[in-house]
Image (cartoon, rainbow, N blue to C red):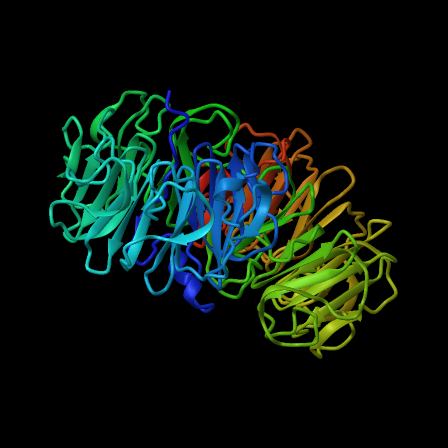
Amino acid sequence: MRDSAPAILLVLLAAATGCSDSTGPTKAIQPTITAGASHSCLLSRTGAASCWGDNAWGELGNGSKTSSARPVPVSGGIEFTTITAGESYTCGLDRTGAAYCWGYYVELGNGSTTSSSVPTPVSGGLRFTQLVAGFSHACALTSSGAAYCWGSNPYGELGTGDTMRSLVPVPVAGGLKFSALATGGAHTCGITNSGAAYCWGLNGAGQLGNASAPNPSYVPVAVFGGLTFTAITAGDSHSCGIIGSGAPYCWGSNSYGESGNLSSGSSVPKAVIGFRTLTSVNAGGSHTCGLTSSGAAHCWGYNSEGELGDGTVTDRIGPVAVSGGLGLRTIATGSNHTCGLTSSDAAYCWGSNHFGELGRPLERGLTPALVSGLTGIASLSAGSESQHTCALTGTGAAFCWGRNAEGQLGNGLMASSAVPESVSGNRAYSAISTGTIHTCAVTTGGISYCWGNGAWWQLGNGSSASSAVPLVVSGGLTFTAIAAGLFDACGLANSGAAYCWGSNLAGEVGDSTTTARSTPVPVVGGLTFSSLSVSDLEACGLTGSGKAYCWGDNYYGQLGDSSNVRKSAPTAVAGGLTFTALSVGELYTCGLVPSGAAYCWGYNYAGQLGNGTTTNVSFPVAVVGGRTFIAISAGGTHTCAVTPAGAAYCWGLNHSGELGNGSTDSSYVPAAVSGSVTLTAIQSGFAHTCAIASGGTAYCWGDDYYGQLGRGVFGFSTVPIAVQP
């Protein structure tokens, strides 16, 4: 076993892990994953950091010392641009280049002998452009290329010319200017601006790359061979780098094949076998991994815990492909585990899992598996015209994923995401609703927020400006529910009164006008509602007695009043039916009656009314099949419902697999959704569908062009797949 081996972070020129972003607040944060000895951390595009695994010294940074097999947010609300994990500590840089560390006290750099379970500033007031964490020491670069290190120093790994440990940053001796640094078990390496490599510290296995250097060396010594490097990384007792041509070289220990060069160990760089080019290389405890230009991952060396990811526990003397064919853009090696991040920000880990460092229950993984995190989902929203999805956990935390061109994910960005993104603001919500290009939610205290496109005043704050973060809805009203549509939204007050705002192009605000409303106005008629549903340019409400009323656009009969005349005030749905649920889709509406029978009305070109035809209908017609349902959701041009037994049925258009039956054939009648998962709730989007299983896990299927299925990749799926947890 090699559980005591250090965890090392990949270092590239220009700080590929994101540290280059600290020089300017306008630069985008690059998501990063990092692996410590027995913990891992992830940096999101918003600058939020989360960690999981061993927490004996507070290295997860969440204010506790309880280990976690699931990601927990790092405390303090700091917007990080870099994060790096050491043995029992973690460090990060903020936008200004200030460094923070947490965990075991020796490596915190704050002059204290007390460990910390929350981020604490590194002393000295220095601003850094790069930060790397080794086994028990950390190093950083200033914008001038000056190197500073702090922490343990028994072998001179701080490069100060002695073996005195330092609890604050101290300059590396020699006056060299570096463009990149890498910290290993008890040694450190760096690359100068000219590409020359230098190392210092322990040299018992030749890891300094200089056969003439003492063991240890307390100051930097040149790596032999005259090679020009573009990247460098340091492991427990070996080092590796990439030269200008892209060829990888390693030196030092090769006891388990970690140098990948068929030697018994070398004190000078030797080429890794099997590869002419790699774009990155990362040295762990006694294993090494690299990425090709296509994102293919290959690993070599020690493999007793499956850290090579090839499905075995056999050591490898040369590179082997990591299973799964994942396209990774970054990879991080820990002591006995490895993690990678895909281009769509999905995190995968494999190898040792004694402390939950893989981000899932304590069972090692011989191949990559998704990191767990988003679980216990209480509600979902995938509006009928939306191409994004949002969810609330049982604690009220909000997550959104999918299309984000208008900021509708609420994470402060405008880039689409194929994995769940935390909504900014850290509020606890009780309800959330996805519109076409905006989203609204209600906090547990009844305060409403909206975000995304605001050009039609649909954010309800008196402005037509858009926002990528939640903004409070004006008026001081307290809502219990909220519903977002195309260019509008409605809220339900405690009294049951409905309020709406937005474009009002078709009278969907319900105030007897077609005048745009930038803040909430009451829906006329004095009706008391128990629920609301909004989509496109139509809104509907259900009274406490089960009577349905609709208002807005009615070109296809979607108001259900046996006409095609739009209404700017609530009008009763024809037929005298009593409903228990209503769902407004794009140009059509569906509902459930007390018996569980489903009825639909309005636009029907794809069979979304479920009556076996494609004829538009301006009044409720029964969905064929005689089934009873407990939940129904009308989408873009398809409808889905859940039976009391938890089985799902869908009907209508199926070009993207939104019916979930394994095909892309449309159906004018209910068709069973594939799989045996028991569902409790369902939401139909524009061309995708999501549902909640009885255990709180979310499943989605259909169109995934913008990542709205939340599975970490793009495309589409004709059967339900779990949202990345």
What residue is rendered at 60% in x and 55% in y? 77
Expressed as whole percent of the image width and height from the top left, the position of residue 459 reads: 66, 68
Q: Is residue 556 in view?
A: no
Name the spot of residue 173 as percent of width and height, x first. Answer: 31, 53
Q: Quadrant of residue 490?
A: bottom right
Residue closest to the far left: 225
Determine whether, in the image, residue 306 is placed left or right of residue 562: left
Give the side of residue 414 with respect to residue 188, left or right: right
- The correct choice, above or below, for 3 with respect to 31 in the image is above
Question: What is the count of numbered marks?
Answer: 0
Q: Is residue 337 left or right of residue 223?
A: right
Point out residue 46 in the picture as x, y percentages from the top left corner: 51, 57
Residue at (30% x, 54% y) in the render: 180
Where residue 566 sits, quadrant-wise, is bottom right
In this view, 408 is above or below 152: below
Q: Looking at the image, which residue is at 21% across and 28% down?
A: 254
Q: Please tell me which residue is depicted at 86% across the width and 67% down the height of the picture.
A: 525
| Picture coordinates of residue 321, whole percent (x, y) | 25, 33
> Closer to the camera, 682 or 391?
391
Question: From this viewpoint, is residue 2 visible?
Answer: yes
Locate the N terminus by quadrant. Answer: top left
